[in-house]
Image (tube, rainbow, N blue to C red):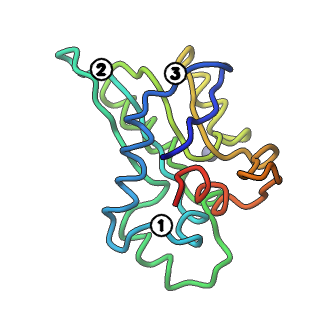
Amino acid sequence: MPRMPSSRPDGLKCDQRLVVEAIAYRRTCNPPLLSLEALGKINVTAWLYLDELGVKRVKVNPNITIVQIREEFGRAPTRDAETGIHSEGIAAQFFKENQRFRVLQIFSERIPCKKMCAPMLNHYFSGVPWFYYYDRASWHGNEGELIKRAGEALKVAYGL
Ligand SMILES: [Zn+2]
């Protein structure tokens, strides 16, 4: 069972569909994005929104395209999800271009970065709560130990 993500503001309940869709995305990618390396390199975001008929839907995307993901795994293991175009930025662009959709919740495996994504989300999606698993400063494993690497943190979060 995946863990319940942390929330900002505190104490909110993430719609579990977001977590389910995010891990389903990782499982169904070709190649599947479930290795420690893939968990570390790719950040998946899932947004809950209301469509024009009032139906709740989920939009999932990684920080880079699937073509880039394939290329990425041929490279030296130096880059990670902190570099390049961030998944939240890609999702935000989609919802800016599709204003008929109303965003209700934003789940990102990693807490939106302080430099770019956090200010952008606060500006364009103010009042929409965030949910996330990994925060570099405060991730604890099942034994209470501090985990510094995103890949290991996500393994625990998803129960992989
Ligand atoms: Zn970011």
30 or 92: nearer the eye? 30
What secondary structure is marked by label 2?
strand
Count residues near mark 2 (Cα–Cα under 10 Å), then give few for <14, some for 14-19, many for 20+.
some
**Where is mark 2, residue-wise?**
50
* Circles 3 and 2: CB atoms closer than 8 Å: no
The image shows residue 136 at horizontal and vertical percentages of 77, 49
For the point 62% across and 43% down, which residue is it? 133
Q: Is residue 116 left or right of residue 107?
A: right
Amino acid type, callout 2: Leu
Badge 2 residue CB within 8 Å of ligand 1: no
Badge number at residue 34? 1
* Circles 1 and 2: CB atoms closer than 8 Å: no
Dividing the picture into quadrants, the one containing residue 155 is: bottom right
Label 3 and label 2: CA atoms lie apart by 14 Å
Amino acid type, callout 1: Leu
Amino acid type, callout 3: Phe
For the point 47% across and 44% down, which residue is it? 45
81 or 31: nearer the eye? 31
114 or 58: nearer the eye? 58
* Circles 1 and 3: CB atoms closer than 8 Å: no
Circle nearer the N terminus (1, 3): 1
Judge whether 91 appears above or below 104 on screen.
below
What secondary structure is marked by label 1?
loop
**Where is mark 3, residue-wise?**
125
Single out the mark in the foreground, 1 or 3: 1
The image shows residue 61 at horizontal and vertical percentages of 40, 49
Badge 1 residue CB within 8 Å of ligand 1: no
Judge whether 66 appears above or below 75 on screen.
above
71 or 14: nearer the eye? 14
